[in-house]
Image (cartoon, helix red, strand yellow):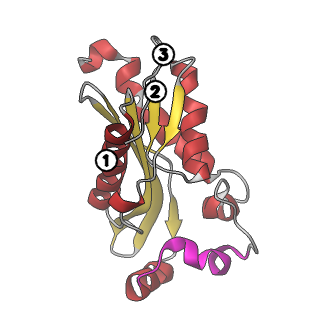
Amino acid sequence: MLEGKGLPGHPLVAIGSRNPAKTKGVRSVFPEFFPGCTFVEVDTSSVAKAQPIGMEQVLSGASNRARFALAQSSGDFGVGVEAGILSVSPREHINLQAAIIVDKEGRSGTGLSCGFLVPDAFIERMRKEGMELDRYSHELTGAERISEEEGIVYHVSKGRVSRLQMTEQCVSMALIPWLNKKAYGF
C-alpha cells in the first residue's frame, strides 16, 4: 500500500494510471479547484480491461481504477479515467473517455469527454483480433508516431482535439458534484 495523506487543505489525489495523457490531464484539472493538492500515481493495470467496449465496461474500468487507487494510497480522492468504445448504433461506434472520481467519504462523480466516430471496419477487426484501437493507429491516421498525449483523436481531428484534452474534459465533468456541493448533497 502506498502511504500518503494530503496536508490540511491540500488533498492527496490518487490517479489510477501511469499513462501520461491521463496523469497530465488529472494534474492539470485538480489544482484549478483544489489549489495545493498533491498527487500519487497508482498502477491499476490489474483492475482494468485492455479495450472496454460498451458504456458498462468503460464506466466499470474507470470506477475500478478510481477505487483501487484510493484504497492503495489512503488519499482524499481516487481518479479513474478509462478510454473505450461506445456503440451508438449497430454500425456507429464512438471512442470517448470516462472519468470517475471517488472521495474518502464514499461520494462519487462521473464525467465524459467528447468522442469521435471510429470506422466500423476497425471495430470489427478489434473484436475479431482482440486488439486495442491503438494497434490500428497508423492505418487509421497515416501518422508514423502517435504520442500518448496526442492520441489517435489528435490526428483524425487534424489537431483540434488531443487525448490530453479529452482527459481534462471528463475529469472536469466528474468534479462537478464537489464544485456544487449543495445541489448534489455533498
**Image location (x, y in percent) of residue 112:** 42, 45
Tell me which segment is drawn in magenta.
Answer: 130-142
Viewer-nearest residue: 79 or 89: 79
Single out the mark in the foreground, 3 or 1: 3
Residue highlighted by disc 2: 12
Q: CA gap, disc 3 to disc 1?
A: 25 Å
Does 124 sit above or below residue 37?
below
Q: Quadrant of the N terminus?
A: top left
Quadrant of the image occupied by residue 154: bottom right
- Residue 9 in the magenta stretch? The answer is no
Residue highlighted by disc 1: 63
Q: Residue at x 27, y 17 (%)?
A: 186
Task: Mark 1: give few (<14), some (14-19) or many (20+) Cα within 10 Å.
Answer: many
- The kind of residue on which mark 1 rests is Ser
**Image check: 60 left or right of 171?**
left
Secondary element under disc 3, as helix, strand or loop, is loop
Q: Residue at x 46, y 85 (%)?
A: 125
Q: Main secondary structure of the magenta part?
A: helix
Task: Mark 2: give few (<14), some (14-19) or many (20+) Cα within 10 Å.
Answer: many
- Residue 138 in the magenta stretch? The answer is yes
Q: Which is nearer the N-term, disc 2 or disc 3?
A: 3
Q: Residue at x 35, y 67 (%)?
A: 53
Residue highlighted by disc 3: 7
Q: Which mark is residue 128?
A: none
**Image location (x, y in percent) of residue 157:** 66, 59
**Image location (x, y in percent) of residue 28:** 61, 33
